[in-house]
Image (cartoon, rainbow, N blue to C red):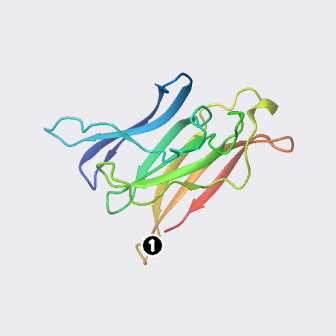
Amino acid sequence: MARFNWVANRICVVWHEYDSIPGGGQDTNIYYTSKAPGGGWQAKVRINDDSGVNEHYRDQFMPALDYDTNGNVLITYYDRRDDPSNTRYHLYMSHVSATGGSLESNVRVSTFQSDPTFYSFIGDYQDVWCETETGSGIDYFLDSWVGVSSQSVGDIYLSLIGP
C-alpha cells in the first residue's frame, strides 16, 4: 500500500516480504520505506518487532498505513506471532515516524485470534485511516479488518486506536 503523507511531504509505502531464515524455514515480515520529492528512497525498515519469537512461525501480512497530523505513520497488519502453527492471526499495529523510526513497540489491536481455516479466503480487507477530533485536534486511528472464527465467518470489524 502507498499513500502520500502531505504533512511530511513524503510518499510512504508498506508491504510484506518473504525472508529466508538462516538454517532453513520461512519468515514473512512487514517493511516500510518513504521518499521525499527530489530525493531517493530511504532504506527499507522492518516494522514487526517479533524477534526472539519462534523464528519459523511468525508471518506478518497484508499491511495498511495512514498518517497523523504530525506526519507520523500508523501501520496495521495481520500477524501470526501468537500461533505456533502459523495459521491463526491477530491484527497488530506499529507507530513510526515518517522516516520509519519506531515510536512505540508493536501492539495487538484485535480482541480475538482469527482462524482462516473456517473460511479459506480472508480477502484484502484491512485498512487504517486517521480522523482528527474537531475542537481538540486529537488524532484517532480507525481500522477495519476481517475476523474469522467458528462463530464469525468473515465478518468485518472496526477498531478504534486512540492516542
Judge left or right: residue 102 versus residue 94. left
Please name the residue shown 51% across and 49% down the image: 128
One can see residue 2 in this view: no
Decide which of 123, 14 is in the foreground and name it: 14
Decide which of 121, 109 is in the foreground and name it: 109
Which residue in the rendered view is the most extreme toward the bottom? 135
Please name the residue shown 32% across and 63% down the image: 70
**Numbered disc 1: secondary structure:** loop
Residue 85, position in %: x, y?
Answer: 72, 33
Q: Is residue 143 above or below residue 115?
A: below
Within the image, what quadrant is residue 82 found in?
Answer: top right
Judge left or right: residue 94 versus residue 109. left
Please name the residue shown 23% across and 35% down the image: 41
Judge left or right: residue 9 versus residue 150. left
Question: In what quadrant of the picture does the N terminus appear?
Answer: top left
Residue 8, position in %: x, y?
Answer: 26, 53
Amino acid residing under circle 1:
Thr
One can see residue 99 in this view: yes
Decide which of 12, 46 is in the foreground and name it: 46
Residue located beneath label 1 in the image: 134
Within the image, what quadrant is residue 136 found in?
Answer: bottom left
Within the image, what quadrant is residue 102 found in?
Answer: bottom left
Which residue in the rendered view is the most extreme toward the left? 38
Instruction: Categorize mark 1 by other alpha carbons within 10 Å: few (<14), some (14-19), many (20+).
Output: few
Residue 75, position in %: x, y?
Answer: 46, 48
Which residue in the rendered view is the most extreme toward the right? 151
Decide which of 155, 16 is in the foreground and name it: 16
Which residue in the rendered view is the most extreme toward the front? 23
Residue 86, position in %: x, y?
Answer: 67, 33
